[in-house]
């Protein structure tokens, strides 16, 4: 009986952690929309059915924060008032309907070839299952009659954290595995390691080969390479430019950002360079595990962009580490973005989406 009780506690705590991370990131989106005075994407959990205005973004994200926050608490402590529990359940079922729409949208786009995904299911399906599990447990919850031991408390806290990590990890994997390529003005390639002899790392050459493919397909008119000078003393962006010139891309179609010291700097510099060149849309090219954070930061800068995962010639030795690092990085940037300065998009960034691009919530 003790083992079953501990197992049930861990299961509830996992679900509570998964619900909590949706609540926290949605709350950050609501605060961002208030500070920026424009809509903020809901960190790619459930697409917003209320429209693209600032207040629609605030209302939807704040609603998700309240509903999933109370659900996380109710599932874990099992002592919410009955009326509050019923209200939360009704709200969660409404959010579940939107998640069903997102799941259906994902599979429709895949079937019609409008997106390509190497991951078999969208994140919205995972969110839907979390919401339905919340509703079911809130419906069948009775206050616990057992006192908590230190072991139970420790396992409960650990499971809450694990639930959050799992949800972020699923987001990084599902979103990054989806290829949204569309016609755009420019492909933005984010830098990676260049060796002291000037040889590009496999990761970087894979990213550049994907961008070159987009250019040859006629998807983009320009390629923007972004990187900084590493410990090897070689500027990544200039090495990337040389690689693309050797691959046959015309010099006048290459834009260089030699100051892309990190993803946020690249997003800011891309916004400036695109404005200078009167470019209005972009494809972001990087490895799949990097793209969720890229999308978040480029959207923050008002850049109209979708993501294209680099075609990997082989698996990376440290791939598991990179995935974990991106989970931590994504969570940090998602939760802290209300603290960063507001960015007012210039006139040529006025459009809200690229033609034919679905809401990112479906992945």
Image: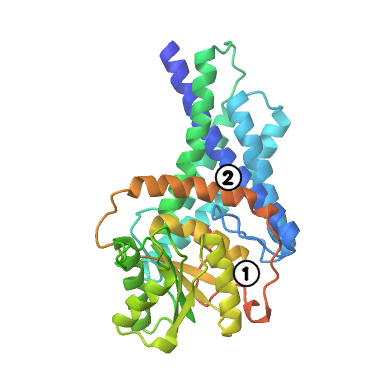
Local secondary structure at mark 1: loop
Q: Nearer the viewer, residue 231 or 214?
A: 231
Would you call the spot at circle 1 few (<14 residues within 10 Å), some (14-19), or many (20 or more)? many
Q: Residue furthest front?
A: 233
Quadrant where the N terminus sits is top left
Q: Is residue 184 visible?
A: no
56 vs 114: above or below: above
Residue under numbered circle 2: 22
Q: Kindly indicate whether the residue at mark 2 contacts the one at mark 1 (C-beta within 8 angstroms).
A: no
Q: Position of residue 200 (x, y in %)?
A: 31, 66
Local secondary structure at mark 2: helix
- Residue appearing at x 55%, y 47% in the figure: 331
305 vs 23: above or below: below
Residue under numbered circle 1: 302
Q: Position of residue 297 (x, y in %)?
A: 57, 61
- Residue appearing at x 54%, y 35% in the figure: 17
């Amino acid at each position: 009986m003790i083992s079953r009780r501990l197992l049930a506690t861990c299961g509830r705590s996992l679900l509570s952690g998964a619900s909590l991370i949706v609540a926290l990131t949605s709350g950050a989106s609501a605060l961002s929309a208030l500070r920026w005075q424009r809509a903020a994407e809901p960190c790619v959990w459930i697409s917003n059915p209320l429209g693209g205005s600032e207040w629609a973004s605030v209302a939807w994200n704040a609603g998700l924060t309240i509903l999933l926050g109370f659900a996380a608490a109710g599932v874990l402590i099992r002592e919410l008032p009955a009326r509050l529990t019923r209200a939360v359940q009704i709200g969660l079922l409404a959010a579940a309907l939107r998640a069903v729409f997102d799941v259906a949208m994902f599979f429709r786009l895949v079937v019609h070839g409008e997106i390509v995904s190497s991951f078999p299911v969208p994140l919205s399906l995972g969110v839907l299952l979390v919401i339905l599990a919340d509703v079911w447990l809130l419906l069948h919850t009775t206050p616990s009659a057992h006192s908590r031991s230190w072991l139970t408390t420790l396992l409960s806290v650990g499971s809450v954290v694990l639930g959050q990590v799992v949800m972020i990890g699923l987001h990084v994997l599902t979103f990054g595995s989806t290829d949204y390529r569309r016609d755009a003005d420019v492909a933005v390639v984010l830098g990676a390691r260049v060796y002291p002899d000037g040889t590009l790392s496999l990761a970087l050459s894979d990213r550049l080969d994907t961008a070159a493919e987009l250019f040859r397909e006629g998807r983009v008119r320009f390629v923007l390479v972004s990187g900084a000078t590493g410990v090897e003393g070689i500027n990544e962006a200039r090495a990337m430019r040389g690689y693309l010139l050797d691959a046959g891309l015309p010099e006048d179609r290459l834009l260089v950002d030699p100051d892309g010291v990190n993803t946020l700097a690249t997003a800011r510099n891309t916004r400036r360079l695109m404005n200078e060149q009167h470019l209005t849309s972009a494809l972001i090219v990087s490895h799949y595990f990097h793209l969720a954070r890229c999308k978040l930061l480029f959207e923050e800068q008002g850049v109209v962009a979708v993501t294209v995962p680099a075609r990997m010639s082989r698996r990376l030795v440290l791939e598991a580490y990179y995935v974990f690092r991106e989970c931590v990085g994504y969570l940090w940037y998602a939760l802290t973005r209300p603290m960063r300065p507001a960015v007012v998009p210039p006139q040529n960034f006025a459009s809200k989406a690229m033609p034919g691009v679905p809401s990112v919530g479906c992945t």
